[in-house]
Image (tube, grey):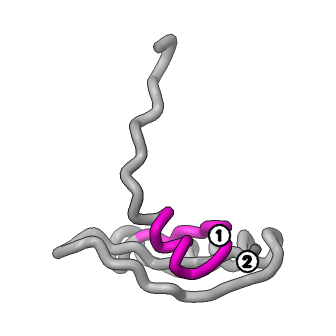
Amino acid sequence: MPYYIYRVTERPIRQLEKLEQHETYKEASARAKQLRKDEVWGTNGLIKMIHAESELNAEDLLNQVRDPVPEGDD
């Protein structure tokens, strides 16, 4: 399964822009870190990497609302 790198923007509505696709975690991780480093924080959205079966599945996973993680001793 490939690794996808997306730019996720929240305003005015949530949008996903596929930037790249890589076959190995090492390549995708290094590239995502480089893209994050090159971005001006928050102005162009967040850079996210996801491992998925297809581009459609990656976008579906990125759009899912996740429950917050409990903090402390919860």
Above or below for 51 versus 21: above
Q: Nearer the viewer, residue 2 or 70?
A: 2
Q: Looking at the picture, which amino acid does disc 2 mark?
A: Pro
Can you identify the residue that label 2 sits on? 2
- Name the side, left or right, on which 72 lies relative to 67: right
Residue 53 x %, y %: 67, 73
Q: Which mark is residue 29?
A: none
Residue 47 x %, y %: 50, 72
Q: How many marks?
A: 2
Can you identify the residue that label 1 sits on? 52
Q: Earlier in the sequence, mark 1 or mark 2?
A: 2
Quadrant occupied by the N terminus: bottom right
In magenta, the rendered stretch is 46-61
Name the residue at 57% across, 73% down. Answer: 37
Q: Looking at the picture, which amino acid does disc 1 mark?
A: Ala
Q: Quadrant of residue 40?
A: bottom left
Residue 26 x %, y %: 82, 71
Q: Secondary structure at mark 1?
A: loop
The magenta stretch spans residue 48: yes
Q: Quadrant of residue 57?
A: bottom right
Q: Secondary structure at mark 2?
A: loop
Tell me whether the residue at label 1 lies in contact with that at label 2, contact meaning CB atoms closer than 8 angstroms.
yes
Name the residue at 45% across, 23% down. Answer: 71
